[in-house]
Each structure stands twice: as structure tokens, then as C-alpha cells.
Amino acid sequence: MIKTLRTWAACALLMTAGNGFAAGMTTHAMMADVARHKLPPEHPLIAVLQHHRAALIAGAMFPDGGYFTGAAFEGDRDLAETAHWDSYTDALAAVAHEAGCADISGAADPWDSLPILGGTFDWAADELARELPIVSLRSADDCGTLVAFLMGIAAHGMGDEVWDALFEPSVYQRGEMHHSSPGYLLDSLPPGADPSVGTLLRGALGDAAFDALAAGFEFINGVEYAMDVIAIRDKFAWDEIPALVFPPSAPLSAAFARLGLDYDGLAIQRAAAGTRLLVSAERVAAAVDYVRVRDVMPYAVSNYETGSGGIHDVAQYIAGYYEHLWDRVVNGPINAAPPFVVGVHPRPGERNLPTAPCLAEPFAACEDNTRRPIADRYIYFALSASPGSDFSELEDAVAVFDEQGNKLASRLTPLPPWASPMSAHGMRIELLDKVLKPQHRYTVTITSQLYDRRGPNAPKARLAQPMIWHFQTGD
């Protein structure tokens, strides 16, 4: 019995470490996948991402893989963090451009009919993937795989920004993120039993180890992990693990090198292996934790797909980012088309926006913890490329007006708060009086004074065209 408990605890600790660092992999994959369906009709990326969907999904999950392996290899955490930001996606797009990957749009889809590995070996790889999904023999040295993987990495970065800016705060403010561990429930399970499961585990591990284990499980009340559990079960997303296909390490290392970073192929392969291991762990969690999540997080479960900052909303932002990055692959970073607005919040023409005030910080619970809608205290937009400058330099480029034409005092700040102004795509227009007033019509203008960065010696590219939109608040 004690040996069994120790084995269970070791497995639990593995899952705890992985998901604590890399929650949200499945929702990231869904965002990347939905975004390809939001591209303009006949866009050349549609065919590329359809034929290389496995590489797209691998890219969407990859940036978090190094967080797990970073527990043993210190540099892997830095690798993972770098892969989240547009400085890396821009570098990888430049690598793809110089490799001639722009020509893929005119190819006759040779990858669609050829196996990745070929013949009996391909069959053996599939069998091994089914038995040991964290062990991958699948990689593909072609432009289609590299471009799709690039788009997946980009989707992850944009997804983190918009999801964390718009969706997660609305969940936390409703009290659906609890800062106590469900692990302590083991002290009362099974009901009426003496000794309880918790007592047995304390005897096997010791009080200090049990408390550390329980504390580690606080992550399962986190939004991204919890929504992965729901998405895996609701969308029957069990089979994405063996489907993942990664490009060779060389172009990924070359992109890091452009940033002055030296990550060899082994570090990249460790991050890929960490990705597979964590995706496997999440699927175990989905099998056992689905009912609990639905019970304790009803608002999140009801809105993670279609709510503001949810999967389909974020996918619209990502689709615009796909267009911009593809242009960089085709034309290079200097000659790519100017940036454009890929998404805004509130949405254009939105009416009856709730304004019941919630004065808590974005990631804190409101004092009024009812189920009614919570106020939108800020306006948010994202560009197809980061301006690469401090937001204070850009404040004259945006303005908010009320229905009388009065310009309202506002400032630009990063949102989510962890985002770096030098790398973020999204910006919050924060009204200085903090709240939107009820029964008002607001007009937001974004002018062509906004720009993106093209390189240290390249001129800045101004916004392709200004944007004006309106929304109305309710009671």
C-alpha cells in the first residue's frame, strides 16, 4: 500500500510540475487551428496549414515545453520564454525567408502525398507513437513544416497576450480561481474513513512533503489548465499527441542565434520532448478532473470558446498575425507590408456593454462576487506586429471620445501586466477615471502614427490605415 501511494505521489508530482509551468497547451492548439479557418479566402497559407496541421499544432504547444525541462536544465526556461515573443517569431520568419520558403505557395503540394518517413519505417513510427507518445521519430525537413511551425509559435504568443488580457481576468474576478489546494480534500476522503487517504499519504511522505505536494496542486484551479481539461473532453482532443511533427533543430537554432542566443539542437529537442510529455499529462488529467472543473468554474466553462478573449475571439487576432508573418516570409522583414489592427475590445458596434463597476485589479476577485457581468474598465487593441517601443511614445496615436465629442483623458499601458512594451502586440487604452459610464456611446480612433519595428537600421513602418470604431454601454 505504502509503495503504491509513493508511486502515485511521484506521478502526481510530475504532472504538477509540468502543468504548473505549461498549462493551456490544448487551448493554444485550438486557437492556432481555428485561426487558419479565419484567413481570407484563397490565402496561400490555408493550404499550407491544412497540409501541415500537425506542425502547426506542435508549434502552438512548443513554447511551453522548455518550462518543464527547465527544472533540470536551467537554460531551457530562457529558451521557452524567448520563444513566446515576437522577436523570436520575426527571427524565425527571416530564416524561412532566406531559405526560400516563399515559393511554397506555388508548389504542387508534394508533401500531401508523400509520407514523412516512408514505407515500413513510417508505419513503425506510427506504432511507436501510439505506444509511447512522448517519443517522437517524426520530423520533416521541408518549408511547409517550418512555416506551419512558425505560425503555431506565433499563435501561442498572441494567444497568451489576448487570453490573459481579456478572458482570464473576467474569470478571476468572479472568484473562479481559488488559492487553496484541492489536495487537502484527501484528508476527508473517503468520507468517514479512518485513516483517510490524506493520513496515509502523510504517513508515507511526511507532513512537509505532503504539504508541498498539496501546494503544487493549486495549479488545477488555474484557468488555462482547467480549460484544457474541458477542451480535451468536450472536443474529444485525445489524439493530438502522436500527430505532432517538429521541424529540424537547425532553423530553430539559427533563429535563436539571430538574437544572440546559443541554444543547440539538444536543448530544442528537450523542449519538444517536454511538450509531448506535458500534453500526455494533460490528457490524463482530463480523464479524471473534468467533472470537478465543470462544477467549480461554471463561468469559465461557458465562455472559454466564444467569450471575449476566448478561443474564437483570439483566433481572429491570430489570423491577422498569420497574414503579417506570411508577408515577412515572402518579402522579408524590411519589405513586408505595413502593420494593421488585428483585433479590438469592445467589438465594433457592441451594444449594452455592462458597466457594473468592478474595481479589483485584473487578476483579483471583485468584492461583489455575483454572477452578473463585470465592468469593462478599459479598451484594448492589438497590432499585427509589435511597435517595439515604450507605450508612452505612442499615446498621441490613439484617442477616445464621448458622444459629445469630448476627448477623454487616457493612457496606453501593457495588458496583460506581464507583457513587455518592447515586444507586446496588445495595448490597453485606460481611461484615467477608470470606468466606462452607463448609457454612453464611445468612439475610439487609432491613427497611422502607430508603427512597427523593422530592424535597427530600417525605417519604421506606419499603420496601414487608421481605424475608428464605436461601442455603447448599457445600464
Image: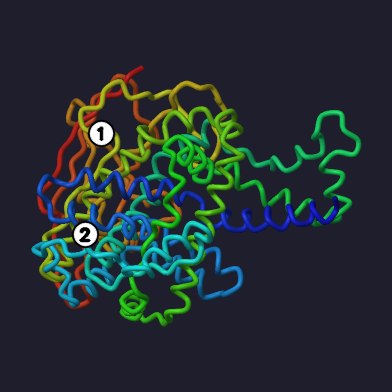
Q: Is residue 31 above or below residue 137?
A: above
Residue 58: x and y, percent?
38, 59
In the picture of the structure, the residue carrying the numbered disc 2 is: 112
Q: Nearer the viewer, residue 13 or 347?
A: 13
Q: Amino acid at mark 1?
A: Arg
Question: Residue, x 45% and y 71% (percent of image)?
Answer: 79
Q: Is residue 318 above or below residue 138?
A: above
Question: Residue, x 11% and y 65% (percent of image)?
Answer: 107
Q: Nearer the viewer, residue 369 or 440?
A: 369
For label 1, the SS is loop
- Marks 2, 1: nearer the viewer: 2
Residue 312: x and y, percent?
31, 38
Question: Residue, x 14% and y 66% (percent of image)?
Answer: 104
Q: How far separated are the C-alphas under marks 2 and 1?
A: 38 Å
Q: Is residue 93 above or below residue 41?
A: below
Q: Nearer the viewer, residue 190 or 452?
A: 190
Left or right of 470 in this view: 133? right
**Image quadrant assignment for residue 316:** top left
**Image quadrant assignment for residue 221:** top right
Q: Which mark is first along the chain, 1 or 2? A: 2
Residue 87 seen: no
Residue 84: x and y, percent?
39, 62
Dot 1: within a 10 Å radius of its alpha carbon, few (fewer than 14), some, or many (20 or more) residues? Answer: some
In the picture of the structure, the residue carrying the numbered disc 1 is: 347
Residue 105: x and y, percent?
12, 62
Question: Residue, x 21% and y 59% (percent of image)?
Answer: 112
Q: Nearer the viewer, residue 358 or 424?
A: 424
Q: Amino acid at mark 2?
A: Asp
